[in-house]
Amino acid sequence: MSEPKSNDPLHGITLKHILDSLVEYYGWEELSEHIDLRCFTNNPSVNSSLKFLRKTPWARKKVEKLYLYLKAK
């Protein structure tokens, strides 16, 4: 028997992949205009942003929402 497929559009996509994709598409400056987070404006880096997003569910949801919007384009 096969397992049922997940309805989650982010299933199997890592937070690092999401952040890398957003930074590649928007760049840090424009990304910080879309989502106003200090980790995107003050000396931004992928590692520091990942650390913050993993600890802050409301911020992670904003990043995931923007990623899904980008992929729907």
Image (cartoon, helix red, strand yellow):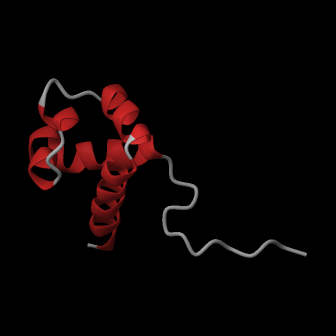
Q: How many marks?
A: 0
Residue 38 position within the rendered picture, expressed as x and y whole percent measured from the top left: 16, 35
Question: In the picture provided, is 5 more to the left or to the right than 3?
Answer: left
Q: In the picture provided, is 68 more to the left or to the right than 26?
A: right
Residue drawn at x 84%, y 73% is: 2
Image quarter hosting the N terminus: bottom right
Q: Is residue 65 above or below residue 47?
A: below
Q: Residue furthest top?
A: 43
Give above or below for 33 relative to 68: above
> Measured from the top left, where is residue 69 in percent x and y?
28, 68
Note whether 28 is above or below 21 in the view shown: above
Place of residue 56 in the rendered image (x, y in percent of width and height, measured from the top left): 37, 43
At a point 38% along the width and 49% down the height, the residue shown is 18
Residue shown at 35% from the left, 34% from the top: 52
Residue plotted at (31% across, 34% down): 49
- The x, y position of residue 12, in whole percent, is 58, 55
Left or right: where 22 falls relative to 29:
right
Residue 68, quarter of the rendered image: bottom left
The quadrant of the rendering that contains the C terminus is bottom left
